[in-house]
Amino acid sequence: MEIIFETKRLLLREFTTDDAALIYELNSNPEVVKYVHEEPITDVKVALTSIIDRIIPQYINYGYGRWAMHLKGSLEFIGWCGLKYRPERDEVDLGYRFKQPYWGKGYATEAALATLQYGFETLDIPVITAMAHIDNTASLKVIEKCGMQFQGFEEVEGCPVKTYTFNNPYTK
């Protein structure tokens, strides 16, 4: 396992095609995908296609993407966190998704803060955005705890969202 970075409790690494079952396990839960308006996936092959078509190209084209998260010690896969370049908006987006047993334990804030730091310090990204469905209060709290600034309400991919930004504090 090649670690991109770690936090006090987490290890983050790139996904590989060997991770299809992990993505399936995560995204087959209707509660996990409720606020992103995706249907739960019903097949490991769909998860593999997602890795090949959506995740790996981000690593190749931009040098970052959504990273698999594991607990230190047990190496249990608990979800993902990372950055995604959204060419249709010309922005870098912070995102995260967790298996339900790991909700409410502070992992999202821990991973998001570390991802922002990595994006600013290591990747020198000037601005990182985040958005969450207006009813996803837990995710909105994470974004706000990270110090991101509210920019407004939008509809993105058919979802009503609140949008936030964070400017790189290390840029002169």
Image (cartoon, rainbow, N blue to C red):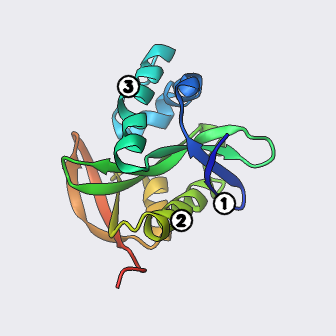
Which of the two marks, 2 or 3, is nearer to us in this view? Answer: 2
Amino acid type of the residue that numbered disc 3 sits on in the rendered structure:
Glu
Alpha carbon separation for disc pair 2 and 3: 28 Å
- Viewer-proximal residue among 29 and 86: 86
Which of the two marks, 3 or 1, is nearer to us in this view? Answer: 1
User: In this orientation, does residue 43 appear?
Assistant: no
Residue 7 versus residue 121 in the image, above or below: above
Q: Residues within 10 Å of mark 2 (few under 14, many from 20)?
A: some
Task: In the rendered structure, find residue 7 and report the number of the disc placed on it.
Answer: 1
In the picture, the quarter occupied by the C terminus is bottom left
Q: Which residue is mark 3?
A: 39
Q: Residue furthest bottom?
A: 172
Task: In the rendered structure, find residue 113 and report the number of the disc placed on it.
Answer: 2
Q: Are marks 1 and 2 in contact (CB under 8 Å)?
A: yes
User: In this orientation, does residue 72 appear?
Assistant: yes
Q: Residues within 10 Å of mark 3 (few under 14, many from 20)?
A: few
Q: Are marks 3 and 1 in contact (CB under 8 Å)?
A: no
Residue 141 versus residue 71 in the image, above or below: below
